[in-house]
Image: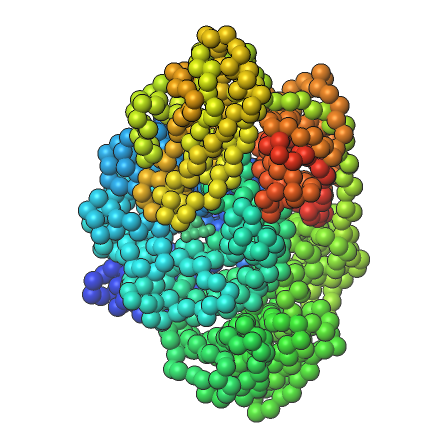
Amino acid sequence: MELSRRTFHALAGTATLGFALTGSGSPTSAGTARSVPTGPPPPVPRADGRRHEVGFDRYSLLVDGRRLVIWSGEMHPFRLPSPSLWRDVLEKMRAHGYNAVSVYVAWNHHSPAPGRYDFTGVRDLDLFLRTAAETGLYVILRPGPYINAEVDAGGFPGWLTATEGRARTSDPTYLRYVDEWLTAVNAIVAKRLFTRGTGTVLLYQIENEYDAHVDEPSGRAYMSYLYEKVRADGIDVPLFHNDKGRNGHWTPGSFGTGGEKGRWLYGFDGYPEPDEVPPDWGHFGTGGAKGGATASPRTPGFVPEFGGGWFDPWGGSWFDGKGYAEARRTRDAAYERRFYLTNLANGITLHNVYMTYGGTSWGWLPAPVVYTSYDYGAAFDEARNATPKLATMHQIGQLLRHVPDLAKLNRGKAVQAADERIKVYHLANPDTGAHFYLLRNDSEETVTSTLPDAGIDVPVTVPARDAKLIAAGLRLGRRTLVHATVQPMLSLTAGRQDIAVFAGRRGDLAQVVLDCPDEPTPMRLDPEPAWAYNLGKLYVTAPLGVGELSRVRIESDGVDTPMLLLFADDATAVRLWPYETPSGRLLVYGPALLRSAVLRGSTVHLTGDTTALTGLEVWGPRGITHVTWNGRPVPTRISGSGSLLALRPLPGVTRPALPALDGWRRRAGNPESEPDFDDSDWTTADKETTFSTTPVPGGQPVLFADDYGFHYGDVWYRGEWTGDSGIESVSLAYSTGTQGLLMAWLDGEPLGTHRMPVPDKERARQGTWTAEAGFDLPERLRKKLREGEPEQRHVLSVLVRRMQHDMDGEALDTHKAARGLTAVTFEGGSPRVKWRIQGATTPDPVRGPMNNGGLHGEREGWHLPEYDDGDWKDAGLPAGDRRQGVTWYRTDFRLDVAPGVDASVGLVLDDDPERAYRVQIFLNGWNLGQYINDVGPQHTFVLPNGIVRTRGANTLALAVLSDGSTPSGPGEVRLTLLGAAAGGVPVKPV
Ligand code: GAL
């Protein structure tokens, strides 16, 4: 209870807030909630060395007694293996109005073996947390231990699949390993808590979507255990869980000490389809049976995950093979407005969009359900580019940051639009008198309607399947907005004037009505706006998107400070950058991104990105006379709107040229298929028992790869026997994730390749992707066997691309389903086979355990840049040979991207889709993904800067698995430019 007591004192001691705390004394009680006034939002968070209080009531979080609406985006540091670029993404998020970043921490990414934990290099969690704090973002930390997240085994390390004990329960063996993980991760997190002033970690999640054992003692004991463990490790911020699907699971008080009131938030997630009517899941809605925020009326509405896109399985079946571009098209800016504004209108004040930057499931990270790209159709694409979806996020984010009235909303009296196709949510702030109306149009036509019930008799337009938030009675600086027909985006004071921005769709007619006691003298600074004054009200209208920014200055209306009204359409609004500095606020207009602003003397130093020739305009505190952009002075003049206006545009970017990929060299890479290959140092596969959920067939040894310490990527098996010359066929039972395959050779002769079919639903649910690959020996081989010596030695070589472990979403231990061979039977003989197995050897100390599997080339370092391929054969692409096996291709290329240019480079592979082959892509030794030519849909692979040297030499190695049934590629292999900006962040080689 310590924290809640401290929070209580902090609140009670804030005399200026002027509210009485009586009754329960808990800041979470609804009675108290009414007493906490709206107030200004907390300042931008930093590691400021001060202690902070984090509490909440039913409206919102309370940080040091001030209301905070969380507008968060999800990104996964483990899906961007270049720490320098974490800063890039975080700065972009912060600039676009997000105030928090939510991160899963994947146990498997940090732990190659029991007792071994690595937080260095691309695993440097502390660096990520420090960067977030430097950027001014709160962090919502979600280290599991189970995370789901479309990663291998739902984040469980590979080695856990071979341990005793039921995962995701209170089983003591499992909890012992959980302790190891949480101890390691919490040691880092405890040092970066916002409460301590040493970081910005604000909230912490335990488990994820845990709905399997909710009503069982072992489930409750497990959750309590996690809660106590995290508290014991010194994590004193509010904890929460992410309830799968608004079931009302794990609400405060629902699981022993773990549900302790006052320090535990209830959260649930939602991933609605675009054609759904947005659901009312918050305090103001019904939330279903017991679901949504209604399940926990005393904690603020919290969605730890709300769909910001969706993932796509192999073959691209979710988006008709069109990939993530289609995810982005169907979950576009209008989707975000409809759903996210509905969330806000339902009292959700902690809002995290999953994903905001999806990134890359590189190496063997992706769960069986996804391919390499985890772009997700998110607001930032995998290549770190801003997409049009940011228009919505930016406008709502800036609004929440600058207009505190939204942090404390009650439902207002029912209001109907004149046109009933518009659904209206009416919200009111009890302290400030501000009203908000969310107008949502779920119909297929654009609707223009008035809101007579709210006294809004000017028409407001809402496009088909879109939404719009309008405000009334809202304080804007020193004036009051009567109402407006477009959404307010921000209100701030810069220097001598108040500035308010209104934003909407291109073609919207914005009308802003202000209370003006005296008739003002507006000043038109751009051609579009017009105005009229009548009975103490000023009516300003501006068509959006005719020009760029439309400016009107209002003065002499009886208020001593002038007001600047700015009107912007989506494309313009996304280039307006408010920025807080210790000496006052700034508003910058023009560039594609503003990263930072520092005031020194009379100069404001700006850094950011431009993608094309652009103007620059700065409204700032008094006394600012000079501007620099990325270190260079920018000559300016003072404009009519009181800004510093650049005399010349800022330069755009020269798109760098990329070299062609040629000079390929190749080498066959499956010597294991040869009978005389030396496998004496391989592991003998002779275990008799396993902790796997897959049964071991009677009379056979355990062949499951995980039982021999091979957890990721390909595994080879070699079975050896003598005699038995009558063998006619062999049947190889095996188990993999989606798109697994098996290739077999007998005495060096290919028997064939078998591809894992998609199992039925129930088997997929169990994580059991098993199949039997039956191979009849070709007559030639049978003859050879028959004609050989009676005690002839035979070798059956098998390569299994086993793909990944099941995610165990239902807590059935399905991550322990076997991977690799499971049973081998023969016809025409019953040889006594001695099996040996080989997979990835020592994990790469830098790239980590999930970078490599057990291909011969990987074991020999053929993927590494330092490997000398001088004796390989020259090869031209496209290739077209027909063989079963592994072939490696390598080439080097140099990039020469100008300093100060952030170029995002991708690798494209393409070929005749009939060709049955796949490619593992290694850039400078990093396994950046898997291309399956005849499955798709991914053809473009993002190469993150830091791994790719943008000024220097790079080595690309491709490991090609071809099944011999068709000619095999690679076909076309080329570099492509996915984005370019002048600016960026300094990038250190990884
Ligand atoms: C959620 C889950 C996430 C992720 C997401 C889909 O239900 O919590 O981990 O799997 O679905 O991308």
Q: Does residue 57 appear anywhere in the picture?
A: no
Circle count:
0
Name the residue located 59 percent from the left edge and 57 percent from the top edge: 326
Residue 928 picture location, percent across and down: 59, 36
When asked about the image quadrant of residue 495, the answer is: bottom right
Name the residue located 37 percent from the left edge and 62 percent from the top edge: 301
Quadrant where the C terminus is found in the figure:
top right
**Compared with residue 104, is residue 344 higher up or lower down, i.e. above or below?**
below
**Compared with residue 786, is residue 514 higher up or lower down, i.e. above or below?**
below
Name the residue located 43 percent from the left edge and 66 percent from the top edge: 343
Decide which of 540, 14 is in the foreground and name it.
540
**Compared with residue 737, is residue 581 higher up or lower down, i.e. above or below?**
below
Residue 549 picture location, percent across and down: 69, 69
147 with respect to 542 (left or right): left
Residue 596 picture location, percent across and down: 61, 50
Residue 49 picture location, percent across and down: 43, 44
Decide which of 328, 493 is in the foreground and name it.
328
Decide which of 480, 762 is in the foreground and name it.
762
**Compared with residue 159, is residue 789 higher up or lower down, i.e. above or below?**
above
When asked about the image quadrant of residue 636, the answer is: bottom right
Decide which of 542, 731 is in the foreground and name it.
731
Name the residue located 32 percent from the left edge and 67 percent from the top edge: 288
394 with respect to 410 (left or right): right
Q: Does residue 700 appear anywhere in the picture?
A: yes
Which color scheme does this rendered protein use? rainbow
User: As drawn, which residue projects farthest toward the bottom?
Assistant: 535
